[in-house]
Image (cartoon, helix red, strand yellow):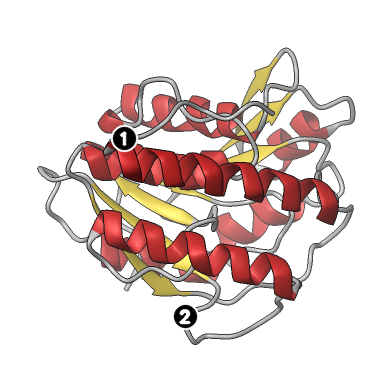
Amino acid sequence: MVARPGVLVVVPAWNEADSVGHVVKETLATVPEVEVLVVDDGSDDHTAEVARHAGAAVVRNDANLGVGAAVGVGLRHALAHGYRAAVRLDADGQHDPADIPVLLGALGHDDDRPRIVIGARFAGKGGHDDVGRPRRLAMTVLARRLSAVTGTRLTDVTSGFRAHNRAALAVLAGPYPSAYLSDTVCALLIASRAGAQVVQVPVGMRPRYAGRPSQSRWQAGAHLARVMGSVALDVARGRPGPALPA
């Protein structure tokens, strides 16, 4: 299975000069049918230059607006430029581009109904996993709640590795949840309330090529707690909530 024409791989990046070039080159070598757009979210290193030299198109935010804002820029770019699908891929190398055709295969060819495919870490494929037990438990609770909303059994709703068809791009073309973790979880709530079908496929995870996560374990845990509270309110009210503060 190879990627279909008209697929844009969106890579949000903030100070990832040491890894983004490897990610772009590996993606283009592994799935040459796609195009790559790196959204540089106000980096103060050479992320944009490295990405461009590696073969990606680059859009740059003047300031660091958050990963969700960068993803939103990329998805709107894909919609505005006529792409049939967009795949989000992290700039640190943890997502394997070899799994992109798997996500696109599960995306199918029905462009009338919005559809999102999540590359799930906890669905049987294995690989690198540095999620601690308390965070894993919280993510399990989130997954159960989102499974109830979407009508599909999901195990990894915080995964940023996902594919969107054109109808899903149209749904998410408005203000995209910008805060860490809410950009993944709340985006699914917004899409599901609009009638999107959400499914998942197993993918592996790899160690980062370089650098360190933008959020510490404590910060990630705090964001996760806020997202859980937001989701609980959204489910109780029957509507997606606003983007959480960064």
As rendered, which of 240 and 203 lies closer to the eye?
240
Amino acid under disc 1: Leu
- As measured in the structure, the alpha-carbon distance from the residue carrying label 1 to the one carrying label 2 is 25 Å
Residue at (62% x, 42% y) in the render: 226
**Crowding at label 1, few (<14), some or many (≥20) Cα neighbours within 10 Å?**
many
Q: Quadrant of residue 108?
A: bottom left
User: Residue under circle 1?
Assistant: 169
Residue at left offset 54%, top offset 49% = 228
Q: Where is residue 160 in the image (x, y as percent from the top left)?
A: 54, 52
Q: In this view, does 110 lie above or below 119?
A: above
Q: What element carries label 1?
A: helix
Amino acid type at mark 2: Ala
Asked if residue 73 is positioned above or below residue 151 in the image, the reply reads: above
Q: Is residue 2 above or below residue 170?
A: below
Pointer 1 or 2: first along the chain: 2
Tag 2, which secondary structure?
A: loop
Residue holding disc 2: 123
Name the quadrant of the C terminus. Answer: top right
Q: Which is closer to the viewer, label 1 or label 2?
A: 2
Dividing the picture into quarters, in which one does residue 135 lie? bottom right
- Whether residue 35 appears in this view of the structure is no
